[in-house]
Image (cartoon, rainbow, N blue to C red):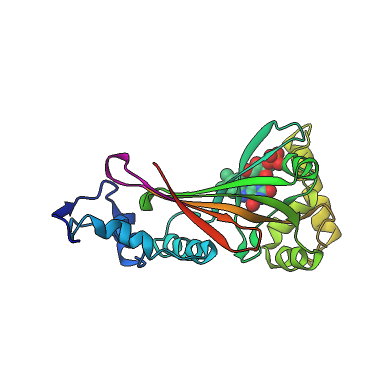
Amino acid sequence: MIGPIVVQVPIFAGEGRLRAALARDAILFRGEFFLPLVVCGLHAFSLHWNLAESDPIRLFKKWFDAAVRAELAEPNAMTLATATRDGKPSARMVLLKGFDQRGFVFYTNYKSRKGRELEQNPHAALVLFWQPLARQIRITGRVTKVTAEESDLYFHSRPLGSRFSASISKQSATIASRAVLLGKLKKIEEKYPQGDPPRPIDWGGYRVHPNEIEFWQGGAFRLHDRLRYRRRRDGSWSVDRLSP
Ligand SMILES: Cc1cc2nc3c(=O)[nH]c(=O)nc-3n(C[C@H](O)[C@H](O)[C@H](O)COP(=O)(O)O)c2cc1C
């Protein structure tokens, strides 16, 4: 049934939103327009949810691509939460470096605090937030290390400076001073004048295999839309709408 005509005045206006509007995808277009938009029928909104993918990875790609097209700063920045064996949490930012049907990949030092926590408790939560698009994505899942080949490939694609930094940093360990760090940097630069340091054995990728992914689209007057996907035993996904 067609409902009354409503005028949507976006509350997240700004340059980013204009770009986002240009980059809009078919889903949730209500959240994509910069200019006031006349929509025929309130029911159109839930209809658009009906267009949502049955596969959350495909939907993730749409949203991620929209964030890239909107030229947001570090669209791949995400919060990674881990916890100790007895459930004491910690969180920090990392960069998403790849995703596919298997999961979401980031790179780090395996002996860092997060690495130690993942060793004890191989479960993590990820959160991405794209403010100009009023979008949040939450992911939880089991974590495994990526293969040595994958880590090598990514390590060697990084700028030389970043490879040297990864090689000298015992991430999350205390150091006496910055001078100590700079001294180590000088040494490794001398050791590898050709600029070909090997990947440190303790540096590599993790993959978060999602069992739950929630898409959050900010709405007017905090009447947000939330779609939660949960993985079934057979690998397929169920979808629920959550109250904002
Ligand atoms: C935007 C942003 C992106 C970051 N990306 C990474 C990353 O991809 N990998 C990483 O190890 N640390 C990254 N860091 C640093 C981490 O937030 C953190 O300081 C570091 O990994 C040590 O965390 P831990 O002691 O909890 O292990 C990033 C920080 C920021 C602010």
Frontmost residue, 236 versus 20: 236
Q: Residue lying furthest left in this view?
A: 5
The residue lying furthest to the front in this view is 1
* Vertical comparison of 189 with 111: above or below: below
Q: Determine the residue positioned at 45% across, 62% down.
A: 68
**In the image: residue 217, left or right of residue 90:** left
Q: Is 109 part of what is drawn in magenta?
A: no
Q: Residue at x 31, y 47 (%)?
A: 219
Please give the range of residues in magenta: 218-227
Q: Is residue 219 magenta?
A: yes
Visible in this render: residue 33?
no
Pick the residue in front: 78 or 235.
235
Which residue is depicted at the point 72% across and 42% down? 114
Horizontal and vertical percent for residue 40? Answer: 17, 61
Residue 139 horizontal/vertical position (percent): 57, 50
Which quarter of the picture shows residue 153?
A: bottom right
Q: Position of residue 230 (x, y in %)?
A: 56, 54
Looking at the picture, tell me which residue is in the foreground, 164 or 142.
142
Give whichever of 130, 163 is nearer the camera: 130
Place of residue 143 in the rendered image (x, y in percent of width and height, measured from the top left): 71, 52
Q: Is residue 3 visible?
A: yes
Question: Eyeballing the image, is 174 above or below 203?
Answer: above
Relative placement, left or right, of 191 versus 240 is right
For ligand 1, the image quadrant comes to top right
